[in-house]
């Protein structure tokens, strides 16, 4: 099998999933995260384990090609075929099979939650909307009073309804 999948046509879904995962750090995609992210009724942890160790023999996905191979093998398993990289040779000059997965947005939400639980406390894995749910801060300039050479700012925490002036 060509190790770079150069014979097959890469579906857009593969690229979208790779970009989503790569934006959070491809080196963070360990088997633990991978299995929790893609596990379903058709793709059990045991099947995902076989796919993972068929494609890569390390603790994390090493490249885009390895990730694409995992996706292709996941699709083949969902079609009832065995886990074998040689099956991908049948897709020369054809589009690789696309696994039936949740939407990219749903998978990204799940990935963020998994990374948040997996990361150390010093690493934030939040989206802007997640942070806004925690609290929103509004900063306003207080109107100047006659004779003041300095200006003051009003800091308003909307979620906890508290005001601070400085």
Image (cartoon, rainbow, N blue to C red):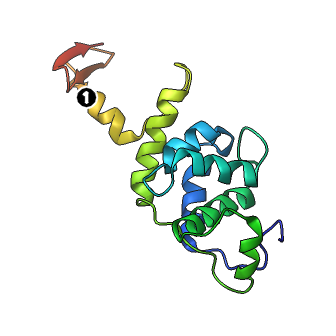
Relative image position of residue 164 (x, y in whole percent): 24, 14
Classify residue 138 by image quadrant: top left
Label 1 crowding class (10 Å Cα cut-off): few <14, some 14-19, many 20+?
A: few
In which quadrant will I find the N terminus? bottom right
The reply, left or right, for residue 116 in relation to residue 18 is left
Q: Name the outermost residue toward the bottom.
A: 93
| Mark 1 residue element | strand
In which quadrant will I find the C terminus? top left
- For image coordinates 42% across by 53% down, the residue present is 41
- Which residue is nearer to you in this view: 107 or 56? 56
The reply, left or right, for residue 32 in relation to residue 101 is right
Relative image position of residue 67 (x, y in whole percent): 67, 57
Relative image position of residue 70 (x, y in whole percent): 65, 58
- For image coordinates 20% across by 25% down, the residue present is 159
What is the number of callouts on the image? 1
The reply, left or right, for residue 93 in relation to residue 112 is right
Classify residue 68 by image quadrant: bottom right
Q: Is residue 69 visible?
A: yes
Q: Name the outermost residue toward the left.
A: 161
Q: Is residue 146 visible?
A: no
Q: Name the outermost residue toward the right.
A: 2
Residue assigned mark 1: 140
On screen, 101 above or below 116?
below
- For image coordinates 59% across by 50% down, the residue present is 48
- For image coordinates 26% across by 21% down, the residue present is 155
Relative image position of residue 7 (x, y in whole percent): 78, 79
- Which residue is nearer to you in this view: 130 or 6? 6
On screen, 45 above or below 76?
above
């Amino acid at each position: 099998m060509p190790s770079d999948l150069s014979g097959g046509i890469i579906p857009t879904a593969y690229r979208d999933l790779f970009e989503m995962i790569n934006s959070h750090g491809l080196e963070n995609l360990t088997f633990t995260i991978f299995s929790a992210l893609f596990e379903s009724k058709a793709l059990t942890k045991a099947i995902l384990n076989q796919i993972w160790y068929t494609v890569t023999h390390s603790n994390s996905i090493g490249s885009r090609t390895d990730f694409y191979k995992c996706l292709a093998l996941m699709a083949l398993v969902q079609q009832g075929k065995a886990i074998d990289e040689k099956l991908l040779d049948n897709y020369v000059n054809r589009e690789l099979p696309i696994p039936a997965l949740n939407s990219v947005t749903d998978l990204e939400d799940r990935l963020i939650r998994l990374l948040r639980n997996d990361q150390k406390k010093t690493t934030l894995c939040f989206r802007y909307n997640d942070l806004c749910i925690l609290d929103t801060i509004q900063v306003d300039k207080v109107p100047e009073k006659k004779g003041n050479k300095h200006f003051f700012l009003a800091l308003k925490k909307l979620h906890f309804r508290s005001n601070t002036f400085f």
